[in-house]
Amino acid sequence: MTAPLNVTSEVGQLRRVIVHRPGLELARLTPSNAEELLFDDVLWLERAEEEHDQFADALTSAGAEVLHFDDLLRRTLAVPEALAWVLRETIDERTFGPSLAHSLREYLDYASPDIVYRVLVGGLTKAETLERMPMPESAVFSMAHDHDFLVTPLTNHLFTRDATCWIGNGVSVNSMSHHSRRREAINYRAILRWHPLFASSEFEVWSEDLETGAATVEGGDVLVPTAASLLVGISQRTTPQGVERLALRLFERGAVDRIVAMRIPDRRAFMHLDTVLTMVDEESFLVYGDLPEPECYLIEPGNGGPPLRTTLLTGSLEESLAVAVGRDVRVLTTAQDSFARERDQWHDGCNVLAVAPGVVVGYERNQASIADLRAGGIEVIEVPGSELGRGRGGPRCMSCPIERAPL
């Protein structure tokens, strides 16, 4: 019998984690489409692959079983029921029109799992479609240019933290903020339902909404400081509506008893809470030194009236973090000048991944943050991030823990 899937802390010994090695999808990035695909720059794919391999090796050396997203999805797509469901959810008439949707599904129905994977994740252009199948009798297809994407590549699958996040003995399949990322959740829903690892495991599903309304949550904004609490960012990608919906479901099932919601500035550099704040041991947080004092709110179950009770926390950031953890905390911030701090933050100096209490993985380029962590007694495993960091995501962004040892 497999060990239970369970994440009750940010820093317990990492046992199993999902990552995604860069692939064809990132070879599709160009200066003209990078912004649409939520990247600030074009990555050198071969170097990004090398850096990611070293990141995965570091996790393995730290004692974690590393599960690769591409392997999980390919094996899932080999299940006929899963393939049919994914194609129905992905290749739909609202996006492709009835004629093109019919033709693409007909082609992919009989393709190998590897080909389906390459289309779903790596994308498909009009010219590539003509190389593989008869020309669809479709106005949508006819009006497209040869190098237009019919199926958009999912470049942000690199950041496995966001589309799902594990909280206690369950998972939230998240409603993503940007259209270019919403299909990621479809792929994860299929994996969670049909891949043998998950099909044979018992776990809760806190949320699996794929709606496009205002209630969005992304995993980079969700931290699990203790088994009984959450720390959630209100950010560019996660809304108060999304936090309330998640809170209600967690409270109804007794998964946590409190959530501290922190509003961070609406800036590209601060897209998720974990770009400015991560937990590094049972009582310590690494925080971007120039983060403006955020508004923080305590969300708790309601008492017979409205389902939720929300209270503004009027203390300092450190005091609000203490509410989330349930005891006094220590805040580590970079002691160097504001220029060094801003450079480090842009390259995810605060976005470190704890692999055990007091042991984190971080990008080697962020020496100011690394020096501060080591001065605070935290061990840092350095990995390269010159190319990976161009995607505005660090080691925590690129990892989705599904099992940690309890503290």
Image (cartoon, grey):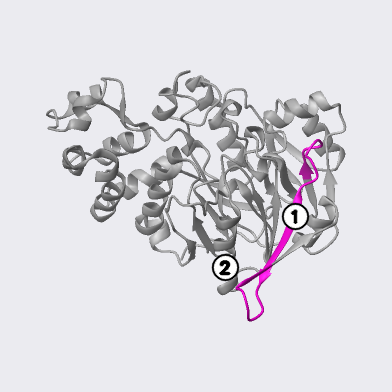
Question: Looking at this view, is 155 or 69 the one in front?
Answer: 155
| Residue in the image at 60% along x and 73% along y | 307
Q: Where does residue 43 sit, x and y in percent of width and height?
A: 52, 22
Task: Give the image location of residue 216, x and y in percent.
Answer: 52, 51
Viewer-proximal residue, 8 or 350? 350
- Amino acid at dot 1: Cys
Q: Does 223 appear above or below 99?
A: below
Q: Evaluate whether residue 88 shows in this view.
A: yes
The kind of residue tagged 2 is: Leu
CA–CA distance in space, label 1 to label 2: 18 Å
Q: Residue at x 64, y 59 (%)?
A: 405
Q: Residues within 10 Å of mark 1 (few under 14, many from 20)?
A: many
Question: Is 59 left, or right, of 298 in this rendering?
Answer: left
Which residue is denoted by mark 2 in the rendering?
Answer: 248
The stretch in magenta equals: 286-309
Q: Which residue is mark 1?
A: 296
Residue at 61%, 55% (x, y): give it.
240
Q: Earlier in the sequence, mark 1 or mark 2?
A: 2
Give above or below for 397 relative to 131. Answer: below
- Please identify the quarter of the rendering in which residue 304 is found: bottom right
**Residue 271: % across, % down:** 62, 39
The residue under the point 53% across, 25% down is: 48
Check if residue 317 falls in the magenta segment.
Answer: no
